[in-house]
């Protein structure tokens, strides 16, 4: 980790350290290794969780873990004072403790170890642990989620969330650099975005309200309000009773919306540039070194990500995969996987845009294709065969928006509050919504999107 | 603005520009001024909203606005082609349009103007505008909020949201630099944080659930799960029927939680450093130059922000302000303002910490003061006389947590899912929750927290 963590070990150490101890100012274990040369022979202090204990009679080996790695601590007679040896007998797995001692070279594959001269126990388990962090990834996912706070102590699982944090940050960084302003739109709303039934009702001071299915209407409003280019990172809620490895009822949306575009290509160019940026940063950024220990972060983003119309996609699926999709219907999951395969083999790309989706499968606010109104200026972005982004140019003309609503059989009155945004000068605009957990799932090749969500919610799961 | 905005004007310009036009790659109007020297005499193209039109017979002056500023466009016979003069007759306030022309010096206070050679109208109002952006800040707040997408076109209002975006980003930047990992915790939860009734019920597939009042339980879980230091920026929901200038039912929380602390001072030190960082950045960061046109961004953060116990605060209030608060009660709004005054006069500080809050007014998860259990390790941070952060060291000892719940008359069974987090090794930890809108309100000296929220929600307001 690149960050300096100066506070905790310094503070916790001061009353307990030997007078001559070199207080390690940054207490991540990975930094002990990074600085091992200068720390060798020095007294240092490290804190974390006891990952494992091996007791070989006169010598006790403790593996100490924090989010960045593990360090072996050796407790033995002659080196470790009697009182500390006594304390060490209390240690069990997952005890939280700090160890002081001298860093020395070791013949183990960890290369270094700490010869303990002092131990401070901060917190002891009050019950036997139901899930061992070291082997948690072998347990059933449901059990892991029930004991997520033990599961995430597994360093490979921890790496997923450190990576997710990093992806969200890179998203913001990229879009800020491109003139986007972050907005914070309400999650309690009076009407659903798409007009569908798949919203969670909220009781709002005796009135009925809903949880926002997406920031769609409000990010458009922000553009029209003159902020011109906006993004949002926030929760989105879908009351859909799906039971798949890619659906959650609550996930984090990465949303963008940009004004003054000429066409949906401008939005696609922006997304493509973002993933190119992400791929490059994933390769070089030191701050995710820990993640690279567990996952291959190489991404294929060619200089031009392939873009095919859905009509072309129907052809490809039929000819190459013998998969006949009904005309003017959405892609199914198999089709997404096949197009992912096609992108990889034909274009050496982990990504492919599918464009010009049929009007009948797209929401009313999508701009229809001029001259061919049965098709739209809407697109999806597939990442390794999974849809991770949906976008479009939006309809910004008041009269056409009204016509779109009627064409969809929706009652314009219900959407009047939204229609009003378009009455007083609305620039042409477009945008996209991305799913953070899906990006992480695909990037790290995880089996289930739940693995990329700290505390997933689905139709069955509402806890912990 | 520091960012280069290359796409939109380039794209929109290309089919319409004169052959010899210098396409301005970044279309923010403020950049026209920044680069005026090199652009003088050049043909450029700018897009935005028509802020105002003055018609002086043979010459028409259009004030064009985008989020960064305004530019005067001059349309006159002999300079502007007839067709463009015809088009200019369609222009009304809030028309979205692009203008091409030559940048020249001007005697007006804007110093430069564009002599139009072409106009492209992108979107025209379909109705008379109900709220004029140029004077919207003089309207009633309720009207402004009803037409927020017109109100935010006012450049002073726009500046508030550009600033809010910037504050959130600086928050993340600072805490990342200090080893904090961003987490995304669920907003749909099975139980309320504090055990109170002030939660919004959600209907979750036929079951009762709630909107999270704060990420309190889950940010603690993330620390205990080995992420050690975490932060979250996300919506929090409070079903409190307050009608004040500082309460919202939905706002954005900036939450931090850190493991391996020695005491609440470690959390306060961290917060204090953050505000010192924010103050410094507000002074020097070029990206908020536009904001500085409208607001004074100077902040007083002394090298040591004053910290007084609430018992000392009772004394100060009584002696200096003749304001007797009931012992062991919370501060009231007047007391907060008085302590803000005290901090400014005595310490030249916009901030003051009030520490060791009484146990009876703090939630069960707060650590009680050793030896004096009627007091806690909980604190508030006041910013110019308004509470903007609440924090504490948390109780991490399972048995003591159970005792705390009982002492508060809460049923431990209801909190068992939370208690479980503490069973298997929980480091000492603490944290704080800050309100983004309140920080912005106090920083910019706004009258009402609603001004700092794009689309506020309160007991009466659920739209737009």
Image: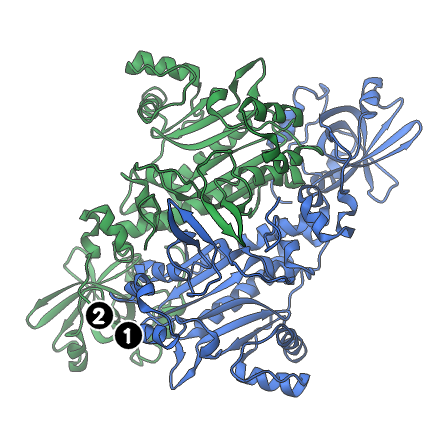
Chain colours: A blue, B green
Q: Is residue A123 above or below residue B421?
A: above
Q: Quadrant of the N terminus of chain A?
A: top right
Q: Secondary structure at mark 1?
A: helix
The one of B36 and A158 positioned closer to us in this rendering: A158
Point 14% across, 74% down: residue: B89
Residue B126 image label? 2
Point 79% across, 47% down: residue: A135
Category of crowding for the residue at label 2, using alpha-carbon neighbours closer than 10 angstroms: few (below 14), some (14–19), many (at least 20): some
Category of crowding for the residue at label 1, using alpha-carbon neighbours closer than 10 angstroms: few (below 14), some (14–19), many (at least 20): few
Q: Is residue A293 above or below residue B328?
A: below
- Decide if residue A5 is in sight here: no
Which chain letter matches label 2?
Answer: B
Q: Position of residue B454 (x, y in %)?
A: 34, 50
Q: Position of residue B455 (x, y in %)?
A: 34, 51
Point 33% across, 64% down: residue: A414
The one of B462 and B99 positioned closer to us in this rendering: B462
Residue A399 image label? 1
| Number of marks | 2
Q: Secondary structure at mark 2?
A: loop
Instruction: Left or right? Give the position of A302 relative to B40.
Output: right
Residues under numbered marks 2 and 1 in contact, where contact means CB atoms less than 8 Å apart: yes
Instruction: Left or right? Give the position of B352 relative to A459.
Output: left
Which chain letter matches label 1?
Answer: A
Q: Is residue A353 above or below residue B201?
A: below
């Amino acid at each position: 980790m690149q960050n300096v963590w100066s506070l905790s070990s310094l503070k916790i150490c001061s009353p307990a350290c030997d007078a001559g101890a070199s207080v390690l100012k940054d207490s991540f274990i990975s930094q002990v290794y990074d600085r091992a040369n200068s720390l060798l022979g020095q007294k240092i202090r490290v804190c974390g969780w006891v990952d494992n204990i091996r007791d070989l009679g006169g010598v006790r080996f403790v593996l100490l873990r924090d989010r960045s790695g593990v360090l072996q601590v050796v407790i033995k007679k002659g080196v470790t004072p009697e009182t500390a040896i006594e304390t060490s007998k209390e240690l069990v797995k997952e005890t939280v403790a700090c160890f002081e001692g001298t860093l020395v070279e070791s013949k183990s594959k960890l290369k270094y170890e700490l010869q303990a001269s002092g131990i401070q126990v901060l917190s002891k388990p009050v019950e036997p642990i139901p899930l061992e962090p070291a082997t948690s990834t072998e347990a059933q996912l449901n059990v892991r989620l029930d004991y997520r706070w033990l599961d995430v102590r597994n360093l490979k699982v921890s790496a997923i969330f450190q990576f997710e944090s990093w992806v969200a940050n890179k998203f913001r960084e990229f879009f800020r650099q491109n003139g986007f302003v972050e907005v914070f739109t309400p999650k309690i709303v009076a009407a659903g975005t798409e007009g569908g039934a798949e919203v969670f009702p909220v009781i709002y001071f005796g009135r009925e309200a809903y949880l926002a299915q997406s920031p769609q209407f409000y990010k458009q409003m922000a553009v029209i309000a003159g902020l011109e280019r906006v993004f949002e990172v926030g929760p989105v809620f879908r009351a859909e009773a799906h039971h798949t490895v890619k659906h959650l009822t609550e996930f984090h949306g990465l949303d963008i919306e940009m004004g003054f575009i000429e066409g949906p290509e401008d939005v696609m160019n922006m997304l493509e540039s973002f993933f190119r940026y992400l791929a490059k940063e994933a390769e070089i950024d030191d701050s995710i070194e820990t993640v690279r220990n567990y996952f291959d972060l190489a991404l294929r983003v060619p200089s031009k990500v392939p873009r095919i119309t859905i009509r072309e996609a129907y052809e490809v699926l039929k000819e190459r995969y013998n998969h006949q999709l009904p005309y003017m219907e959405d892609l199914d999951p198999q089709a997404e996987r096949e197009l992912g395969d096609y992108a990889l083999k034909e274009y050496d790309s982990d990504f492919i845009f599918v464009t010009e989706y049929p009007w009948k499968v797209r929401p009313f606010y999508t701009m229809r294709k001029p001259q061919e109104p049965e098709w739209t200026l809407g697109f999806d972005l597939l990442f390794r065969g999974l849809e991770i982004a949906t976008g479009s140019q939006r309809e910004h003309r008041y009269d056409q928006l009204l016509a779109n609503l009627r064409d969809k059989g929706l009652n314009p009155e219900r959407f009047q509050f939204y229609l009003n945004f378009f009455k007083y000068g609305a620039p042409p605009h477009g945008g996209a919504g991305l799913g953070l957990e899906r990006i992480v799932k695909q990037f790290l090749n995880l089996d289930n999107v739940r693995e990329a969500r700290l505390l997933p919610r689905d139709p069955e799961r509402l806890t912990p």
